[in-house]
Image: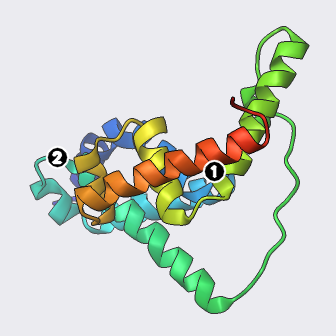
Amino acid sequence: MSAANNNLAFERLVRPHFDRLYRLAWRLAGNKAAAEDLFQELLIKAFGLLDDLVKIEQPGPWLSRVMYNLFIDEKRRFARRRMHTVEEGEMAGDGIAGLAGGDDPVHANQRLEKIRRLDAALAQLSDEHRIVVLLHDTEGYKLSEIQELTGAPVGTIKSRLHRARARLREILSADGTIS
């Protein structure tokens, strides 16, 4: 295939999945910069595997699985390095602060505070629990899609989802967010 044909084939196969893949990258990575890096890494990897990608009937789940594997690989590399970095402070309009929205500042502030509490509660979950609850409850992935993505059996995913929700209820009820 020529370079132009490769570009067109890649665009046709991958472009329809951009939004969902970027949201997955953001959910996995937890911040915009890391999500953008992960998303870009996926695109580079997928372009290199274009011959395989062309043969796949449904590229969306395959691309999600590749992204998940890239994420896990990076987490393992980071853990081996034992390097600790300091995250930049949250900038206005970036991250969860940008979700408050609305014209009523009181309502927007209350919503932002709830979002921050939920974000803090999610941060207290294990990686396995947080990823499953975010993929299922936030992004709408089906259990079978999460199984394909993570490689964990559906029963394990159901168990993790149940435990994650229970732990979130426990954390949020302890801080008064839910009653």
Judging depth in this view, the residue of 151 and 64 nearest the camera is 151
Quadrant of residue 19 in the image? top left
Residue type indicated by callout 2: Gln
Percent coordinates x, y for residue 94 in the rendering: 77, 40
Judging depth in this view, the residue of 58 and 44 nearest the camera is 58
Numbered disc in front, either 2 or 1: 1
Judging depth in this view, the residue of 46 and 158 nearest the camera is 158
Can the viewer see residue 51 in this picture? yes
Judging depth in this view, the residue of 11 and 67 nearest the camera is 67
Crowding at dot 1, Cα within 10 Å, few <14 / some 14-19 / many 20+, comes out as: many
Q: Is residue 84 above or below residue 1?
A: below
Q: Is residue 53 above or below residue 108?
A: below
* Residue annotated with mark 1: 122
* Residue annotated with mark 2: 58
Mark earlier in primary sequence (2, 1)? 2
Residue type indicated by callout 1: Leu
Residue located at (53% from left, 47% from top): 166
Percent coordinates x, y for residue 159 in the rendering: 36, 56
- What SS does tag 1 mark? helix
Residue 43 appears left or right of 46: right
- What SS does tag 2 mark? loop
Residue located at (52% from left, 61% from top): 38
Residue 152 appears left or right of 33: left
Q: Quadrant of the N terminus?
A: bottom left
Residue 75 appears left or right of 107: left
Q: CA distance from mark 2 to mark 1?
A: 31 Å
Percent coordinates x, y for residue 29 in the rendering: 58, 58
Can the viewer see residue 39 in this picture? no
Q: Is residue 108 above or below residue 151?
A: above
Residue located at (29% from left, 65% from top): 152
